[in-house]
Amino acid sequence: MDPRTGAAGATRVCPHCKTTILESSARCPACRHYLRFDADASTSIGTQEATTALQVEGTIRHPSEGGAWEYSVVLVIRDEAGKELNRQVVGVGALFGGDERHFSLAVEVVPTNDMRRGPNRRGRH
Ligand SMILES: [Zn+2]
């Protein structure tokens, strides 16, 4: 079920990079272009400042011995029951002797005034 326009979780496609982003975003988190020309987009649900609720970082370094390492960066989002909501391969590549890659995951949350319960929240209360 797609969230309706103006509701928490409503999405749109970034006109610059075509990534699906929050309708309320003033700036695309993927390509970092500013998008806010329609000021109503976020004020309708009272969007506040985004804060980083989770951040994980790590580095992998090839030990300079042996053959190259291929890697896949897999991102999985699950709900409170463990049900998979989204699984994506964000990037793939290879590390050759001595190469290093730094990985960073950030989850930004934006408080809104939307008090509706989501479609899966019935009977929880
Ligand atoms: Zn973009």
Image (cartoon, grey):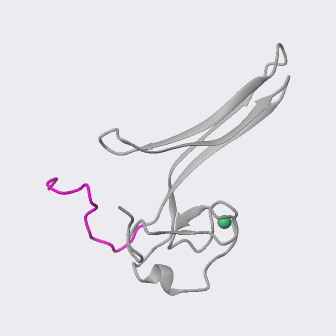
Q: Residue at x 41, y 77 (%)?
A: 6
Q: Residue at x 39, y 64 (%)?
A: 2
100 relative position to 28: left or right: right
Magenta highlight on residue 121: yes
User: Does residue 117 lie above or below 106 as drawn?
Assistant: below
Residue range in magenta is 111-125
Query: Which percent across, then down, holds residue 45?
Result: 39, 78
In front of the other: 60 or 73: 73
User: Does residue 4 lie above or below 93 as drawn?
Assistant: below
Query: Which percent across, then down, holds residue 37?
Result: 61, 85
Q: Residue at x 16, y 53 (%)?
A: 124
Residue 63: name its quadrant.
top right
Quadrant including the N terminus: bottom left
Query: Which percent across, then down, holds residue 12?
Result: 53, 70
Magenta highlight on residue 6: no
In front of the other: 75 or 106: 75
Query: Which percent across, then down, holds residue 42?
Result: 48, 79
Residue 7: name its quadrant.
bottom left
Quadrant including the C terminus: bottom left
Residue 31: name its quadrant.
bottom right
